[in-house]
Image: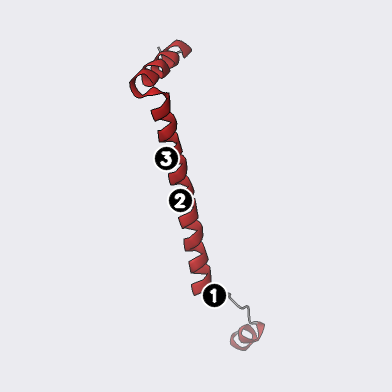
Amino acid sequence: MGLSAQHFLLLIIVGLLLFGRGKISELMGDVAKGIKSFKKGMAEEEEEIAKSSPAKTIENDVSTREKTG
């Protein structure tokens, strides 16, 4: 009792009748712009974090282990 290809076709036709081709393509363009701006914002934030704090490293000092052990 799942959705068949005929059901999907009917839903697409109803969607086109309700919104029209232009409105659907306009909505998809807006979604694409939103995704691009989100990715750009994430990249800028990562760059700011990388510039503000240098990478921290853990040094393995063998001489301190020999003194304590």
| Farthest-out residue, front | 22
Q: Residue at x 44, y 14 (%)?
A: 9
Q: Residue at x 66, y 82 (%)?
A: 62
Q: Residues within 10 Å of mark 2 (few under 14, many from 20)?
A: few
Q: Earlier in the sequence, mark 1 or mark 3?
A: 3
The amino acid beneath tag 2 is Ser
69 or 46, which lies in front?
Answer: 46
Q: Is residue 3 at least partly visible in the picture?
A: no
The amino acid beneath tag 1 is Pro
Q: Residue at x 47, y 56 (%)?
A: 42
> Mark 3 = which residue?
30
Q: Is residue 5 at least partly visible in the picture?
A: yes
Vertical placement of 49 versus 18: above or below? below
Vertical placement of 12 versus 32: above or below? above
Q: Earlier in the sequence, mark 1 or mark 2?
A: 2
Residue 55: name its quadrant: bottom right
Q: Quick check: 63 left or right of 30?
A: right
Q: Helix, strand or loop at disc 1?
A: loop
State the CA–CA distance, disc 1 to disc 2.
27 Å
> Mark 2 = which residue?
37
Between disc 1 and disc 2, the foreground one is 2
Which label number is shown at residue 54?
Answer: 1
Q: Residue at x 58, y 86 (%)?
A: 68
Q: Earlier in the sequence, mark 3 or mark 2?
A: 3
Spot occupied by residue 15 in the image (x, y as percentages of width and height): 37, 21
Vertical placement of 45 versus 20: above or below? below
Q: Helix, strand or loop at disc 3?
A: helix
Residue 19: name its quadrant: top left
Q: Helix, strand or loop at disc 2?
A: helix
State the CA–CA distance, disc 3 to disc 2.
11 Å
Residue 60: name its quadrant: bottom right
